[in-house]
Amino acid sequence: MEVPRTPAGGVLKVSAQSNPNSVAGALAGVLRERPAAELQAIGAGATNQAVKAIAIARSYLHASGIDLVCIPEFTDVEIEGNVRTAIRLLVERRSEVAAS
C-alpha cells in the first residue's frame, strides 16, 4: 500500500470559475518556498482550469530555473455529507531546467 503524499501547506482548490492566472500565481508562490503543492479539482471545468494554471505556473517559474512535474490521481472528497470523486494534482519541483 502506498503512503499518501500530502505536501505541507494545504490544498489549492480550483473551481470551473477559477482564474488560471491567479491559481498559477498562488501555485508558483508555494513552489518557490516548498518542494511540492497540491491542486484539487472536481469536474471537467475545474480540472481544465487547474491544468491551465500548472502550464502558466511553469512559465512563471522558468526564469527562476524551476521546472515542474505533475502527478495526477483520483481521490474521494466529502462535501456536505456526500462523497465526490476529485482529481488531485500533486505538483513537484523538478531538479533544474535543462540548459538550452
Image (cartoon, grey):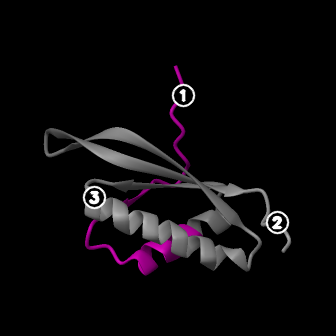
Q: Residue furthest left?
A: 81
Q: Is residue 36 left or right of residue 1?
A: right
Which of disc 2 and disc 1 is earlier in sequence?
Answer: 1
Q: Amino acid at mark 2?
A: Ala
**Nearer the viewer's eye, disc 1 or disc 2?**
2
Which of disc 1 and disc 3 is earlier in sequence?
Answer: 1
Q: Which residue is mark 1?
A: 3
Looking at the image, is 31 positioned above or below residue 25? above
In the rendered structure, find residue 98 and report the number of the disc placed on it: 2
Magenta segment: 1-28
Q: How far apart are the alpha carbons under marks 1 and 2?
A: 30 Å
Q: Residue at x 54, y 39 (%)?
A: 5
Q: In the rendering, at what x and y percent does residue 26 appear?
A: 49, 72
Q: Which residue is mark 3?
A: 44
Q: Residue at x 44, y 70 (%)?
A: 52
Circle 1 SS class: loop
Q: Amino acid at mark 1?
A: Val
Mark 3 closeness class: few <14, some 14–19, many ≥20 residues within 10 Å: few
